[in-house]
Image (cartoon, helix red, strand yellow):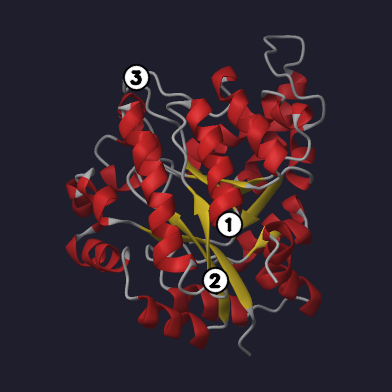
Amino acid sequence: MVVKKIAIEEHFSTPENSKLWNDSGEADRNGKSYTDFIVDRLWDDNKAYQDELNRLGIVHTVMSLTSPGGVQGIDDPKTAVDLAHSSNQDAYDHYVKSNPKQFSMFAAVALQDPNEAAKEAEHAVKDLGAKGILINGYTNMGDVNTPMYLDDPKVDVFWQKISELDVPVYLHPREPMPASTQIYQGYPELIGSAWGGFTQETAVHAIRLIMSGLFDRYPNLTVVLGHLGEGLSQTLPRTEHRLFRQRNGEVNAKNVKPLTSYLHTNFMCTTSGHYDTDALESAIEAFGPDRVMFSVDYPYENNSDAANWFDQLSLPEDIKQQIAYDNAARLLHIK
């Protein structure tokens, strides 16, 4: 049976955005046919896309800007600020304005200038109807060896604004810094989405946010993780246990509650690009059935693969409906 769904990690690019990036590294790693498939669909024919979504029961889709680093990967602050602003307008014009029933958007922001990021977040949410913000991992700060993570004190002005706006932030993966990729030497195919280049980088970033005390300062914040929580359903209990055993050693954490408790209060996760039933059940247990949401990760994944896997799951009907539609509708105020 086809289940009614909302998908919230779905990607687009714009001609302006695509000019800024050399995707030869992606093409080398992914292969030409797969890369061509992605590129052809990042600025897609909406009619064909909508027809496919309708066939699969995906009644609403939240679009967000893609790229090797998105806005976060740009070194020059002004270029990043301008790209975030123009891309948000493009997303609104190309998707949301033409069909608000089918499409909404997560906004891009340039944290190279946190004050400008806060202003753009407010503009996108209040003027363009953005459902939240999507951030592609750490932010380039002009030196490839000194990235800025979201727990940096300079970002607090942005988090203050997000708390005020009361919208979620989707923490999307990006590749680790070049200086952190030695372990993948000889196996470049593991740098991206296949393994630690995405999963490990994003999971550690999420743990940094917890340990920084961010969610104790702003308890209404919600951070969304893709790919069934980037492995945290399995790894975070071990981290929590080991840090407790190390409590009389080096302690820099500011969190006031156990690490895993924040999964139930300040995080949600999606099924994007991770269509494994055992992993889904683990995520439901770790985050709670009211904090897991369906997603595809289009065009990096096929809509049909994601939807057909989900439709055939043997889950209690109430939980299946929560994950497919209700949880995202509640979080994003989709009617």
Q: Which mark is residue 100?
A: 2
The numbered dot on residue 129 is 1
Q: Are marks 1 and 2 in contact (CB under 8 Å)?
A: yes
Label 1 vs label 2: CA separation?
10 Å
Determine whether 157 is above or below 303 in the image: above
Q: Which residue is at the front of the view, 166 or 221?
A: 166
Q: Nearer the viewer, residue 323 or 195?
A: 323
Q: Compare marks 2 and 3 and give the one earlier in the sequence.
A: 2
Tell me whether the residue at label 2 lies in contact with that at label 3, contact meaning CB atoms closer than 8 angstroms: no
Q: Residue at x 37, y 62 (%)?
A: 300
Residue, x 35% and y 38% (percent of image)? 82
| For residue 315, side relative to residue 277 (left or right) | right
Which disc number belongs to residue 145? Answer: 3
Instruction: Assign a secondary structure to mark 1.
Output: loop
Query: Please, what is the three-letter code of the amino acid marked with disc 3?
Result: Asn
Is label 2 or label 3 in front?
A: 2
Q: CA distance from mark 2 to mark 3?
A: 41 Å
